[in-house]
């Protein structure tokens, strides 16, 4: 699959499937934007990705809040 340069939004990026999806998408060349409620977990993911030469843009977001989700998507460019 060729997704190089695609913009991808991933929720729950701090652990589990969200973390793995963000990592895999970045490895495929996508520009990844991730959100989670846990700032410490997001920082750990960012550091892990940086060690592999990958980038991720992160923001705290509560997906149960429409305002929070709107703010997250407004930060995607």
Image: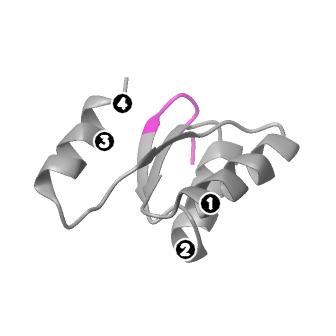
Residue 52 visible in the displayed image: no
Bin the neighbour count of mark 3 within 10 Å (Cα to Cα): few under 14, some 14-19, many 20 and up. Answer: many
| Left or right of 45 in this view: 73 | left
Residue 59 visible in the displayed image: yes
Is label 3 in contact with label 4 (beta carbons under 8 Å)?
yes
Q: Nearer the viewer, mark 1 or mark 3?
A: 1
- In this picture, which residue range is highlighted in magenta? 1-7
Q: Which mark is residue 17?
A: 2
The secondary structure type at the circle numbered 2 is: helix
The earlier-in-sequence mark between 4 and 2 is 2
Residue 12, position in %: x, y? Answer: 45, 66
In the foreground, 70 or 28:
70
| Residue in the picture at 60% in, 40% down | 56
Say if 6 sits above or below 8 in the image: above
Residue hosting label 3: 72
For the stretch drawn in magenta, the main secondary structure is loop
Distance CA(mark 4)–CA(mark 2)? 21 Å
Q: Which mark is residue 26?
A: none
Q: Which mark is residue 76?
A: 4
Q: Is residue 21 magenta?
A: no
| Residue in the picture at 34% in, 54% down | 61
């Amino acid at each position: 699959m060729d997704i190089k340069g695609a913009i991808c939004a991933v929720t729950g990026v701090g652990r589990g499937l969200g973390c793995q999806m963000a990592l895999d998408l970045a490895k495929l060349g996508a520009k990844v934007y991730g959100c989670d409620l846990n700032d410490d977990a997001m920082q750990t993911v960012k550091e892990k990705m940086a060690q592999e030469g990958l980038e991720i843009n992160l923001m705290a977001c509560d997906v149960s809040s429409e305002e929070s989700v709107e703010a997250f998507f407004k930060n995607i460019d």
